[in-house]
Amino acid sequence: MDSFDYVIVGAGPAGCVLANRLTEDPAARVALIEAGPDHNARKAIVRIPLAMVTFMAPALAFLGGPKFMTWFTSEPEPGLQGRSMMLPRGKGTGGCTNINGQVFIRGQREDFDGWRDRGNPGWGFDDLLPYFRKLERFEPLAAPRSSRHVRLGPRPLADQVDPALHGTDGPVNIAPMRSVNKLAYAYIEAAQLAGYELNPDFNGPRQNGIGLYTFTQKNGERVTAESAYVDPVRHRPNLTIIGNTKVTKVVFDGKRATGVEWKRGAETGVIAAREIILSAGTFASPQLLMLSGIGKARELARHGIPLVQDLPGVGENLQDHLDITLEYRAKSITPYGISWKALPRKHPPSVRLAVAQARASRLDNRRRWRVSVDRSEQRAT
């Protein structure tokens, strides 16, 4: 049985950060366990921002997107006429940062202060700001020339950002849009005419208003939790990364967690640890707790799971946001579209690569199909 000081279950953003920080102590032995593949950050399908559309499009599954995805399904929703919702999550080292839209938003000051005021000292916005700053390389301040093309108000973007609220030497590069669609500026102008105030920085003093997002990108490429936090420390001898391995249960000695059970294909095993950290995400962490015997006693009994601790809140009170897409047919290629004619105008380098890969994959699939047909005909004759 392998033994570590810390076992981190889930290599999404939280797990990657913890792996980086905990292994700063050379005496701490750390295992990072992930259900999906490792070494993802340099793969084109992850690195190219536009490739995110392939993760959720069944017709583009041949590009490899599904192996980075886990799909959960909601219970029938009364507010959606009884329909169930698909709940996508990232899989693989980097987690959801491999598949997300890369929009960088910290959250409202009021939310953090609300946590503090409800009895959680150290969780107010001012308490967390040093950590927000520590993770950032905020490009409009670190490299002001990078945002010269962004037109938000009469002054350059860098002059409208409060440096006290941002970091400039952190591991996660936060970049402005590399190219701004004309319709975005038209939308901003219309919103201001409707009475909304211009906001050049949604991670600044306030979040209300109209403006442009910043993104977890560098040089037009996606920045993931893996590339920012894990890849720079892979060489540390006290870090062990275990990919394509699913944790199925937390092992307890009484009410003390002592290890985890894992499964990889037909293999199973146990890893012991002084401390277990669950960072498997909003869905998988509470699910794993319940499978391990921590949750509402009545619910666990219904599924035949031995009770370790009756904790009714586990697995309940999920709050999510709806994502609604409105589609319009346009005669111009100015809007952000997915036609072959429009795409190269939006992200020329990345799209050319994506299109080339798609065409190459289709040709390869056709060749394989033809070979398969030829062999079948040969066997038939």
Image (cartoon, rainbow, N blue to C red):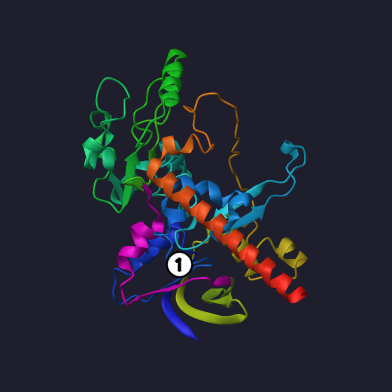
Residue 61 falls in image quadrant:
bottom right
Image side of residue 189 versus residue 360, left or right: left
Residue in the image at 43% along x and 58% along y = 14
Residue in the image at 49% along x and 32% along y = 336
Residue in the image at 40% along x and 27% along y = 211
Q: In this view, does 87 lie above or below 339?
A: below
Residue 24 screen position, x and y as percent: 29, 68
Location of the C terminus by quadrant is: bottom right
Q: Which residue lies furthest to the top in this view?
A: 193
Magenta run includes residue 169: no
Residue in the image at 27% along x and 28% along y = 160
* Residue 65 visible from this viewpoint: no
Q: Residue furthest bottom?
A: 1
Image side of residue 371 versus residue 94, left or right: right
Residue 164 falls in image quadrant:
top left
**In this view of the protein, which residue sits in the foreground, 253 or 237?**
237
**Amino acid on which disc 1 is placed:** Asp
Within 10 angstroms of label 1, few (less than 14), some, or many (20 or more) residues?
some
Residue 72 falls in image quadrant:
bottom right
* Residue 194 visible from this viewpoint: yes
Q: How many labels sit on residues? A: 1
Residue 156 screen position, x and y as percent: 24, 27
**In this view of the protein, which residue sits in the foreground, 8 or 315?**
8
| Residue tagged 1 | 38
Residue 177 screen position, x and y as percent: 36, 36
**In this view of the protein, which residue sits in the foreground, 37 or 283?**
37
Q: Which residue lies furthest to the front in this view?
A: 381
Q: Is residue 241 above or below residue 130?
A: below
Residue 154 screen position, x and y as percent: 27, 19
- Kindly state the secondary structure of the residue where label 1 is placed: loop
Q: Is residue 59 above or below residue 191?
A: below
Task: Magenta stretch: give its range.
Answer: 221-247
